[in-house]
Image: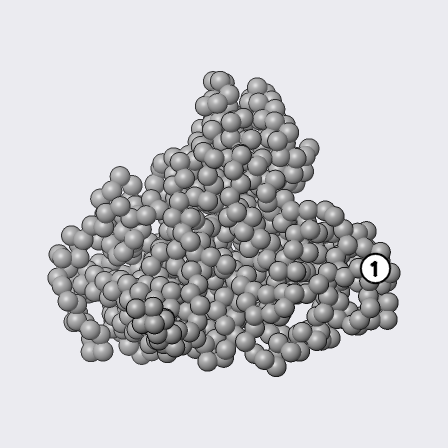
Amino acid sequence: MQKLCFLLVCLLWLIHPLQADDGYRLWQRYDRMQDAAKLQQYQQTVTGLWVEGTSPTLIAAKKELSNGLSGLLGKEVPEVKQLTQNGTVIAGTPASSSLISSLNISEKLKSLGEEGYLLLTTNANGRKSTVIAANTDIGVLYGSFHFLRLLQTQQDISNLSLSSAPKVKHRVLNHWDNLDRTVERGYSGFSLWDWHRLPDYIDQRYIDYARANASIGINGTVLTNVNANALVLTKDYLVKVAALADAFRPYGLKVYLTARFSAPIEIGGLKTADPLDPAVQAWWKKKAEEIYSYVPDFGGFLVKANSEGQPGPQNYGRNHADGANMLADAVGPKGGIVMWRAFVYDDKEPDDRAKQAYNEFKPLDGTFRKNVLVQVKNGAIDFQPREPFHPLFGAMPKTPLMMEFQITQEYLGQGTTLAYLSPMYKETLEADTYAKGKGSTVAKVVDGTLDNHQLTGVAGVANIGTDRNWTGHLFGQSNWYAFGRLAWNHTLSSEEIADEWLRMTFTGNPAFVNPVKDMMLASHETVVNYMTPLGLHHIMGWSHHYGPSPWIKDKHRADWTSVYYHRADEKGIGFDRTKTGSNAVAQYFPPVEKQFASLKNCPEKYLLWFHHVSWDFKTNSGRKLWDELCLRYQAGVDGVRQMQKTWATVEDHVDAERFEHTKSLLRIQEKEAVWWRDACLLYFQTFSKRPIPQGVEQPAHTLDYYMKLDPKFVPGI
């Protein structure tokens, strides 16, 4: 029997010899590299490790380098105390290391600021060495991760001469985590933060979470939901927040909290939360002092106010600047900031919800305190699969604007969809606002270079939870990774980032990397095609936003329905945002307005966003709009099927667990793509009165069947 079991194990290994991997290690896999020639080269280049300094951050850097180098090289890389041979990796700052100080690289370090670093091959005491140097300990840690990334992606490290510094100062994850551990718009289990067992139990996941963020340069985390609960500001929770802050601090990760605007009433016993009331101002200043007594490096507040029913300054006849400035004055003395979200719409239905944030914030430009960032979503509606850039970018030159991307896939298939989002992020960042003429990109607004702002920031709404692989869908990790890499350096290409992530997360074998990278790069467009092609938007399921529901109407406010956005009728489809409609195009600078307002020149990907278009309108392909719409939906389905085929070809290069995980989810994604195509085309056909063209599969069910589908208990609500 034992022989039989042994033979079975051997057979299974021969069929799939790769070791099982559940995805927990993310992109920080330090397994012995398989390329024998590259391994030998690295073993000759790296023979020892020298890290001077005893700070928690330098200790973390030393541990990461020791574990990473030893794992990748397949043998222990010893810590050395003197340079007796070539190949030592030397890490530190001029202040922490006499050896670093002796290298005369202070001029090179000057321009790198508090977080930048140098990777340099040089002679140290007559020995060829690799130097990781920075002005601060956290810079050394970031540089250490970069060096390990070079090895993981099999780059040449024999003659290094590179430097790196972040283009944006605050690179922050927004966790929409509730105190009961549910996660709004989270699709990967419950919240990481185990409030019940804090502050005394520090889960290893907290450390690994901080390591992962530091490895891609993320330096802040907002622990709580923007739909805030004031209890997190009480002593009982602040001691727990402090424990998390202590765990994160060695990795350069600052803690932020969401501030519920009505907290002075709810936990402070006041009768008002009016930001101009002296008692309210005093309460927030005292509360800030209390928070800093627990967390000396507390980052500050993120605020959602006067939006979707949340309390705010407008409740008292005040404006957003009044509210933001009150909180900014409270945290300012300790170096804290306020991130005030521009995602606002009140109980009164506007003529076009896309216009409301601009209308409320543009007049306030220049009235915010210096430590306030106005946090603006990438588009004006709500994290749609595709949106034109938000018109506020470029429109508030006196106010630093912080980008808000959504990493979690609320409107992009949630936890069952493979959608690599770097191309979507890049589409926004590279868009030209024309605020100061051609070349005034959104990226230049965000990084402060367009208007000379020193306070800069990028936020990403996280999808990180208790699922063993952190993000539910394994490929969801790529969006966390891409967000961090772009927050550090928005000039990186989506292809570069995908290449890095694949090599670090799976293997560097080109037979795997090349086809899967192509699959990733096409995935966002594929999802847009089967969900919201040609500029359609917000036609998802009611409330939970899962699955197609273009027929949603007659709710308590029109701008929470689908028909409000697609406006399909017998003449055509699309939201007229030109001067004959809501005139939202007028919020853009003239060259952009002119392009978007022109039916002829509007980019086809935004066509139905800005125009109500006849079903017979001739598209760029030469086809009529109805036929083009149908074929785009079919292209989305075909795209998912191509992803399935691609994934099937790389089975030999992936461990069985992660291969089957992705294969199963792609099977689900294909079903969902078909659902989207069939439901949307049958519904829109009731207006177009035209047949579904050749080349498009006929729906398997009736429209009535799809309209009756009602998914229960969709996660993330």
Relative to 416, say whether 53 is above or below: above
Relative to 265, say whether 632 is above or below: below
Q: How far across and how far down the image is residue 411, in percent?
A: 36, 55
User: Residue 72, located in which quarter of the rendered image?
Assistant: bottom right
Query: Around disc 1, counting alpha carbons within 10 Å, would you say few (fewer than 14), some (14 to 19), or many (20 or more)?
Result: many
Q: Secondary structure at mark 1?
A: helix
- The residue shown at (50%, 23%) is 264
Answer yes or no: is residue 196 visible: yes
Q: Amino acid at mark 1?
A: Leu
User: Which scheme is used to colour this image of the protein?
Assistant: one colour
Q: How far across and how far down the image is residue 314, in percent?
A: 46, 31
User: Where's the C terminus, which quadrant?
Assistant: top left
In the foreground, 266 or 500: 500
Relative to 648, say whether 331 is above or below: above
Count of marks placed on residues? 1
Residue 198 falls left or right of residue 370 = left
- The residue shown at (74%, 48%) is 54
Q: How far across and how far down the image is residue 475, in percent?
A: 42, 63
Please name the residue that numbered disc 1 is placed on.
99
Answer yes or no: is residue 564 visible: no
User: Residue 256, located in which quarter of the rendered image?
Assistant: top right
In the foreground, 84 or 457: 84
- The residue shown at (13%, 57%) is 705
In the foreground, 365 or 526: 526
- The residue shown at (53%, 50%) is 209
Q: How far across and how far down the image is residue 186, in percent?
A: 39, 48
User: Where's the N terminus, which quadrant?
Assistant: bottom left
